[in-house]
Amino acid sequence: MSIKTIPLTSGRNLFLSSTLVMGVLNLTPDSFSDGGSYKNADAAVDRALEMERQGADIIDIGGESTRPGAKMVPAAEEIERVVPVIKALRASSTIPISIDTYKATTAKAALDAGADIVNDISALRFDPDLAQVVSAGKVPLIMMHMLGTPATMQNSPHYDDCVGELMDFFSERLAFCEKQGIDTGKVILDPGIGFGKRLEDNLYILSELARFKKLDKPLLVGTSRKSFIKMVHPTDKPARERIGGSIASMIMAVMNGADIVRVHDVAETVEALKVLRAIREGI
């Protein structure tokens, strides 16, 4: 991969010479693993700062659940959830902040409040105005692959060639970005583990992740606490206790080329990555 640094605002950068850890901060009552935990702005900022102390490189803030079957949240409600937290976190820290949204108005409000990156599960397909917000803001964009919408994505997903079809999807989306005046040197790709994928698709993507390097873009992978882990290792434990499977799948993703990992369990992930790096490179 030729892209090693992605510029942010105010002279800051994302350095991709080593794996970056993106800490998840859900400001929703119904997220699949930690819904309702950080509805209070003070608690949310405290959690973000805790993740930064634990070694997170990016904080990903979302105000709408995108779990399977989730329904859309109005932009005004989403903005009300995320903007106060972004402002308060930016006042306390310079850590890069990504806004997890597919809505242009939410993205614009979040960027104005101090966010640095737009993380769009729709890859600019759901809101025709979002591309202009990203282009005008000159901010990095994370584009994720998903079949359908969160409400429909797990309704019998099917692929003839999962990785090949995702490659074609990203090639088309990158061409769209160029037409919209978006700097594709700031685009990060996410194959969307668990978003319109069967168990076999998720496992295949992780095993074949290196194929996406042909697109010459940084890769973000999010496997943290997802339901495919329970499919592999059935248990009655809640999603927040799927740490073993989360770490195992994250390590496989990194070994196969992930540049950024999106996780809930930051401290455990940072520890695992340090051990992996020591084994690969020596202390």
Image (cartoon, rainbow, N blue to C red):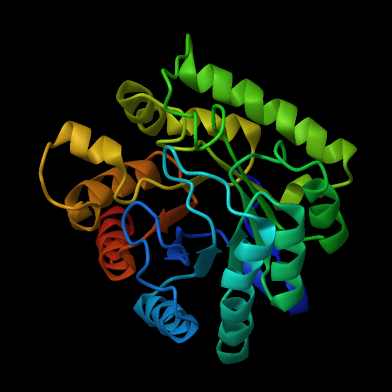
Where residue 201 appears, as percent x and y from the top left, is 38, 23
Occupied quadrant, residue 257: top left
Identify the residue shown where x is 73% and y is 26%.
172
Asked if residue 264 lies left or right of residue 184, the reply is: left
Location of the C terminus by quadrant is bottom left
Q: Nearer the viewer, residue 127 or 184?
A: 127
Occupied quadrant, residue 278: bottom left
Asked if 223 appears above or below 77 in the picture, the reply is: above
Asked if residue 195 lies left or right of residue 165, the reply is: left
Identify the residue shown where x is 88% and y is 59%.
136
Residue reaching furthest top? 160
Q: Nearer the viewer, residue 89 or 252?
A: 89
Residue reaching furthest bottom? 92
Asked if residue 151 lies left or right of residue 54, the reply is: right
Where residue 154 appears, as percent x and y from the top left, is 42, 27
Occupied quadrant, residue 209: top left
Identify the residue shown where x is 70% and y is 39%.
126
Where residue 269 appears, as percent x and y from the top left, is 30, 62
Location of the N terminus by quadrant is top right
Identify the residue shown where x is 44% and y is 83%.
49
Could you tell me how many numbered marks the image carries?
0
Where residue 107 appears, as percent x and y from the top left, is 71, 60
Q: Nearer the viewer, residue 235 or 76?
A: 76
Q: Nearer the viewer, residue 103 or 23?
A: 103
